[in-house]
Image (cartoon, helix red, strand yellow):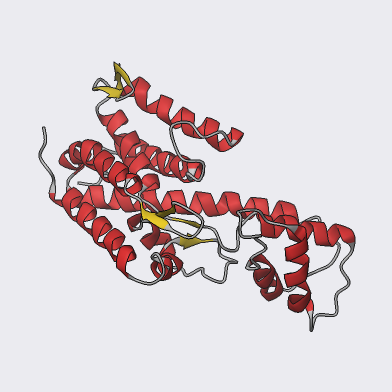
Amino acid sequence: MFRLTDTIKHIIIINFIAWIATLFIGNYGEPLSSWFALHFPLSKDFEFWQLFTHMFMHASYVPSGVSSYSIYFPHILGNMFMLWMFGCAVEDSLGRKKFLFFYISAGLGAALITLGVDYVQYLSIVSNLTVDLDLNLIKEILSIDASNGRGFITSDIFLKKLMPVMQGYDINLSNQDFRTLFELNATGLGYKSMLGASGAMTGVLVAFGMMFPESRLMLIFFPVPIKAKYFIPAIIGLDLFSALSGVSVFSPSNTAYVAHLGGALTGFLIMWYWKRTQFNQNRWD
């Protein structure tokens, strides 16, 4: 029951090595997060390898005061515990190679769906511009830090920092254009990042539910055993509710709920396809 499978063990080790590295490299792990966490493609920090590396990175620090940070454990401990709890049974059933393919695919699916949703948001905002802006200029505008130092984005600071950026461009911005650019900057698409194994882990959770639907599961704060075929869809449903409403349930407010849903959808589609083709020439032996 408590056996640790080889692939799960190696994934956990890699995640902890990456997490520990953020504790000792740079300013609160910022360089590693800039290189390996997933950024929006129009961010100055985006690199193609982040589609893969983000799922092995976890938050290492959280602010504990105005100028101090504290080490953050729950993110990686929660994900790795869930991976061990559900992933070992899934790996035992699928095999090492098939499980690794599934895990990476769920993580990639989570990343691509998240970027897709972000891109739709980006297009919705820039469609309100009355002028055409160069992509390089948009990247610069997205990267403007208009924070007042207390966690709030202000239009005054944004305008002050926008003016030097606009120099060299023969563009007259209307009030509507300024409001649109301020809204675009306030989304955080230029500097926010996504990291963690949650997307891949949610895919594994879905696989467990499809393979072991009668298994009984329960939450620590709701100690009533519930069959996996009901429990796991309920968890996915809470993610969907949080993603649509913006109200966090059982998770921090910065949780990437869309990534959870992306990983769950990818995991479901892969398991559905494998189940459908298990008896024909397209099966994966």
Q: Is residue 250 left or right of residue 274?
A: right
Query: Can residue 91 be seen from the camera position used here?
Result: yes
Q: Is residue 136 left or right of residue 223?
A: right
Q: Give x and y (percent) for residue 64.
A: 44, 51
Q: Dividing the picture into quarters, in which one does residue 37 lie? A: bottom left
Q: Tell me residue 3's x, y (percent).
A: 10, 39
Compared across the picture, whether 102 is left or right of 148 comes to left
Q: Is residue 100 above or below residue 132?
A: above
Q: Residue drawn at (86%, 67%), measured in percent from left and top? A: 173
**Residue 282 visible in the snapshot:** no
- Say which of 252 and 204 sits in front: 252
Residue furthest bottom as drawn: 168
The quadrant of the image that shows the N terminus is top left
Q: Left or right of 230: which side holds 168?
A: right
Q: At which x and y percent is residue 84?
A: 21, 41
Taking the spot 42% from the left edge, 64% from the top edge, the residue there is 33
Q: Quadrant of residue 250?
A: top left
In-front residue for pair 246/48 = 246
In the rendered image, the vertical position of residue 250 relative to residue 160, given as above or below:
above
